[in-house]
Amino acid sequence: MAMDPFRGQGGIQMLLTAEQDAQQVISNARNMKMARLKQAKDEAEREVAQYRANMEAEYQKKVTETNSGSYAQRLEEETNAKINNLKESSDRVSKDVVDMLLRYVASATT
């Protein structure tokens, strides 16, 4: 009669070895996960620093443009153009409003 290999001391030793192997696999996976998380955090911090540097450079460029007057000049030109457009629109509309009021008054008196 053949002896079952999982019975007795041999079987217990095999289970203990398998459990130790499983613990080692879990420990390795946990360590790899932590290393990857640290790597991802470091990459994110580098990207944030690069983004911040780009935004700062862009801000400094705008400050320089503003101080040099070119930005202020462009803003003044845009404002004047908008004012002229509003004046033209109001001239057209006011003529239409006057015509409409004259028609209304004329029809009300008849």
Image: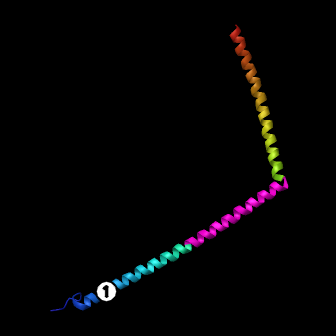
Q: Position of residue 48 (x, y in %)?
A: 63, 66
- Who's the residue at 77% across and 24% down the image? 95
Question: Which quadrant of the figure has residue 13?
Answer: bottom left
Q: Position of residue 76 (x, y in %)?
A: 82, 45
Residue at the far left in the pictured view: 1
Q: Quadrant of the N terminus?
A: bottom left
Look at the image and name its color scheme: rainbow
Q: Position of residue 27 (x, y in %)?
A: 43, 80
Q: Position of residue 80 (x, y in %)?
A: 81, 41
- Who's the residue at 72% across and 13% down the image? 105
Rendered position, 30 above or below 6: above
Q: Is residue 33 left or right of residue 66?
A: left
Depth check: 91 or 20 in front?
A: 20
For disc 1, the marked residue is 16
Residue type indicated by callout 1? Leu
Q: Which residues are magenta?
A: 40-69
Rendered position, 24 above or below 90: below
Depth check: 20 or 1 in front?
A: 20
Check disc 1 and report its element: helix, strand or loop. Answer: helix
